[in-house]
Amino acid sequence: MAAKKEPKQLDELFHEGLKDIYFAEKKILVALPKMAKAAESDEAKAAFEKHLAETEEQVARLERVFEIIDEKPQGKTCPAIIGIVEEGQEIIKEYKGSPALDAGLISAAQAVEHYEIARYGTLKTWAQQLGHTEAVKLLDRTLAEEKKTDAALSELAETAANAKAEAA
């Protein structure tokens, strides 16, 4: 008779979540330069380039969290981020040269931010429950950056991109 399989624990779920967001951040590192290149306005280009630099720091922070739990930094395929990034690539193709391009790119970037905010919020909570105090601080810093980026993208959309798209 086969041994009864032990139920998975919160620490395993936390590790799986880290692998998921690590994969997502790596995917975002590839997508952001394409979005910056495609953007029409200097403001949108600058926003994507700023987020690229932040994302590089966030990846380094995640690698530190992996160290804290004695695991090797590695990603696990995340279908959600693949779909979100693919939607952004579609916008680039379908709206190239259109006054609505930047509005579409910003909306795609916000979809990424909202995904990241959800993931980092959950991971921070789990880290707290697991007693990983240093990981909580690292994840909280990233969560705050993601929220700030989302707010900056909203402002950019409302003050420039959406109006430009509507005026055309």
Image (tube, helix red, strand yellow):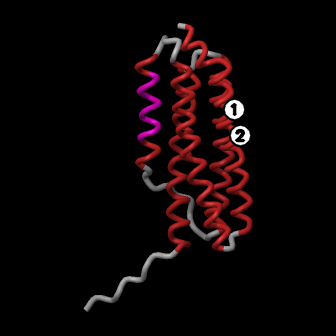
Q: Position of residue 50 (x, y in %)?
A: 69, 32
Reply above or below: 3 against 15.
Answer: below
Q: Is residue 101 left or right of residue 58?
A: left
Amino acid under disc 1: Ala
Q: Position of residue 63 (x, y in %)?
A: 63, 57
Q: Which residue is mark 1?
A: 152
Amino acid under disc 2: Lys
Q: Position of residue 149 (x, y in %)?
A: 67, 37
Q: Is residue 9 left or right of residue 65?
A: left
Residue shown at the point (67%, 43%) measured from the top left: 147
Where is the N terminus found, in terms of image quarters?
Answer: bottom left
Residue shown at the point (56%, 34%) measured from the top left: 109
Which element type, helix, strand or loop, lies under badge 1? helix
Q: Among all residues in the image, which is located at the extreme top?
A: 168
Which element type, helix, strand or loop, lies under badge 2? helix
Labels 2 & 1 near each other (Cβ < 8 A): yes
Q: Position of residue 102 (x, y in %)?
A: 56, 20
State the residue in front, 39 or 144: 144
Residue shown at the point (64%, 67%) measured from the top left: 127
Q: Which mark is residue 148?
A: 2
